[in-house]
Image (cartoon, rainbow, N blue to C red):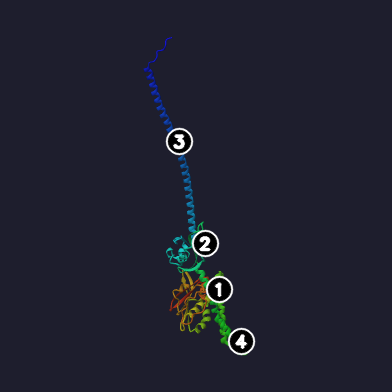
Amino acid sequence: MEDSPRASNGEVNANLGDVHRFGAASESLFRRLYRGLSQRQRLEQELQRQRQIAQRHTAESATLRRRLERLGSEHQQRGDELDRLTKVLSSLDEGIIVQDMNGKVTMMNQGAQNMLGGKRSFWESALGTLFERYRAVQEAVAELTPLGESEEMPLNNRIVRAQLIAIGDEASRRIGTVIILRDVTYDALAERLKDGFVTHIAREMERPVGVIKLAGELLSGQPEDAAVNQLLLDKLLRNVGALDQLALELLDISRLHAGAFDVQREPVGVENVVWSVINGIESEIKRRGIDLLVMTRDLSGVHVRGDDARLQWALGHLIRNGATFSTDGGYVALAARVEARDAKNYALISVSDNGAGISQEDLPHIFERFYRGDARRAADSPSGLGQGLYVARAICQAHGGFLEVESRLNVGSIFTMGVPVHEIVADAA
């Protein structure tokens, strides 16, 4: 068998060169391929990581969004609650003032503004002094801790009771202050009236009781067969009548206060009321040196529907008042007529005098219970509890009428009582 032709060294070397170049090329190819795959894997891993980060961020964003939504909802609820609380505080008659630790007013309801006259007046009032007294207190053992006792103080022409309260946090630290105000003007005045009432009653009763006691002792010292001392009897009767009148007035006041004040509803002749009072009081007025003048016009057949005794009492009180505040030689004039007001006929009875008159300061208050004001007259200050005009006006109002006054100091006064005219329909023949 013939041997195969042996390759030449050149051919072998060429083939080895080709293999080497192929191997080098393959190595470069695989290296690039591996690197590409590795890079792609790294990119995929990075992409996966970024996706995971994005997912976490998305979840965190969703959580954050939900948290923000929840916080927004809670904020809205708190805002609504604050609005409702503010409306409630604004509707309270009590004053509420909230301050921070430096004393800056952060909230003041309408009640407090009405009592104080505005935020700007705080530091100029007694409330500013009250706050300064407790400014240094840093501890609040509870959420609301009273600082001292409540105090009464004058505030913008009122009497106000104020309570200072420290607002505390969970660590018992004071973080602010709230002041609660209550207008006690009426209560304070009522208390003063009650304190003065017993004194007035005692003074009012002292004189008639003293006269009665003295007259009784004088009468008891007379022989049994002695003639009746008419002068002493008259004094006894007058002073007993004064005590009886005082008791009736106080009874009427208690009924008015209890809402049980009532009047009879019967036809009453106006002319009869006028002359019954005049005939019963004329001698008393003249003894005081006061002239009593009476003028009536077109009263024949004029009636009102009401209580004859109470109407006589009211008119008699107005006449006595006029005489009481007049000096010797003065006068009290009564004028009665029918006059239309607001399309309704009224029986008007005016009582005027030329006495001391009433000051403009006292005039708005003279119909208030137990108000006496500044009595101005030539003689001593008149006795009385100051309840007469209050009762007289109540009587007129109970009849559907009114009692009004005009007065000038040192000139005189005119009191006019008006009661609706009652039309009496005659029975058919």
Q: What residue does disc 2 label? A: 145
Q: Secondary structure at mark 2?
A: strand
Q: Residues within 10 Å of mark 1 (few under 14, many from 20)?
A: some
Q: CA distance from mark 4 to mark 3?
A: 131 Å
Which residue type carries mark 2?
Thr
Which mark sits nearer the N-terminus, 1 or 3?
A: 3
Q: Would you name the residue on which mark 4 appears?
A: 220
Tell me the amino acid under the disc marked 1: Asp
Q: Which residue is mark 3?
A: 45
C-alpha gap between disc 4 and disc 1: 35 Å
- Nearer-N-terminus badge (4/2): 2
Mark 3 → mark 2, Cα distance in angstroms: 63 Å
Percent position (x, y) of residue 76?
A: 47, 52
* Quadrant in which the N terminus is drawn: top left
Query: Dots 1 and 3: beta carbons under 8 Å?
Result: no
Q: Are marks 3 and 2 in contact (CB under 8 Å)?
A: no
Q: Which mark is residue 252?
A: 1
Q: Earlier in the sequence, mark 3 or mark 2?
A: 3
- The percent position of residue 188, horizontal first and vertical second, equals 51, 70
Which element carries disc 1, helix, strand or loop? helix
In the rendered image of this protein, does residue 69 appear above or below residue 233? above
In front of the other: label 4 or label 2? 2
Quadrant of the rendered structure where residue 409 is?
bottom left
Within-10-Å neighbours for mark 4: few <14, some 14–19, many 20+: few
Q: Nearer the viewer, mark 3 or mark 2?
A: 3
